[in-house]
Amino acid sequence: MQASRSLAATLITALAVSGCAQTADVTQGDFAPGYDGIETILLDGDLVNFRVAMKGARDNEDVAAYARCAAAQYALIRGFGFARHVRTNVAKSGDVWRGDAVYTISPALPRGLKTIDAEVTVRDCGAQGIPTV
C-alpha cells in the first residue's frame, strides 16, 4: 500500500512539474471539438492550476468543462473525492481556445457553491467524450 502511494506521489509530482498532454477529437452532432492537451501545475498542497487547449469550442463553457474534467480526474488520482472551482480564464487566439483554471481539491465536500464530486464529474465527462488527465 505504501509503495502504491509513493508511486502515486511520484506520478503526481511528474504531472505537476512537466504537465500532462492528452489529445482527442470527439464528434457530437455538429459539435466536433479537438482536445489538444492538459497541463497540470500543483501550486500549493491542495491548490492546482489546469491549463487546457482545444479547437472547435462553441464558447467559454466548453473550455471550462474541459478544465473541470481535468480537475475531477486529478482529484481522484490524488485520492480525493471533491474539488472546488476558484477561477477560470479563457482566451481565444485564431482557432485555438485556451483555459487557465484553478481548483482546490479535498477529501471532503468543501465549502462554497462551485464544488464538484470528482467521481460523478469524471463519469459525466466520459459520457460527453471529454478527456481527463
Image: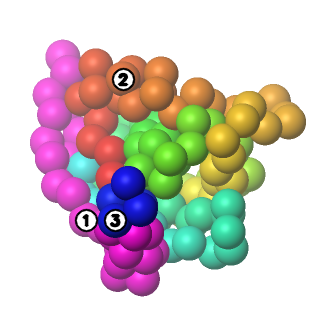
Q: In terms of sequence position, does the residue under pointer 1 or pointer 3 come before the other?
A: 3
Residue at 18% of width from left, 16% of height from top? 29
Stretch of the chain drawn in magenta: 6-34
Residue 18: quadrant of the picture: bottom left
Residue occupied by mark 2: 123
Report crowding for label 2: few under 14, some 14 to 19, many 20 or more residues within 10 A (C-alpha).
Answer: some
Q: Can residue 15 be seen in this view?
A: no
Which residue is tagged 3? Answer: 3
Distance in Å between CA atoms under marks 1 and 3: 26 Å
State which mark lies toward you, 2 or 3.
3
Q: In this view, does 38 lie above or below 67?
A: below
Q: Where is residue 120 in the image (x, y as percent from the top left)?
A: 47, 21
Report x, y in % for residue 39: 39, 68
In the image, what residue type sits under mark 3?
Answer: Ala
Residue 132 forms part of the magenta stretch: no
Q: Position of residue 50 (x, y in %)?
A: 50, 61
Q: Looking at the image, can residue 107 be seen?
A: yes
Give above or below for 100 relative to 19: above
Q: In this view, does 4 lie to the left or right of 40?
A: left
Q: Which residue is drawn at 33% across and 59% down?
A: 4
Q: Distance between the residues labelled 1 and 2?
A: 20 Å
Residue 21's label in the rendered image is: 1
Q: What scheme was used to colour the molecule? A: rainbow
Report, in whole angstroms, how far the alpha carbon at label 2 lies from the one at label 3.
27 Å
The answer to whether the residues at label 2 and label 3 have Cβ atoms under 8 Å apart is no
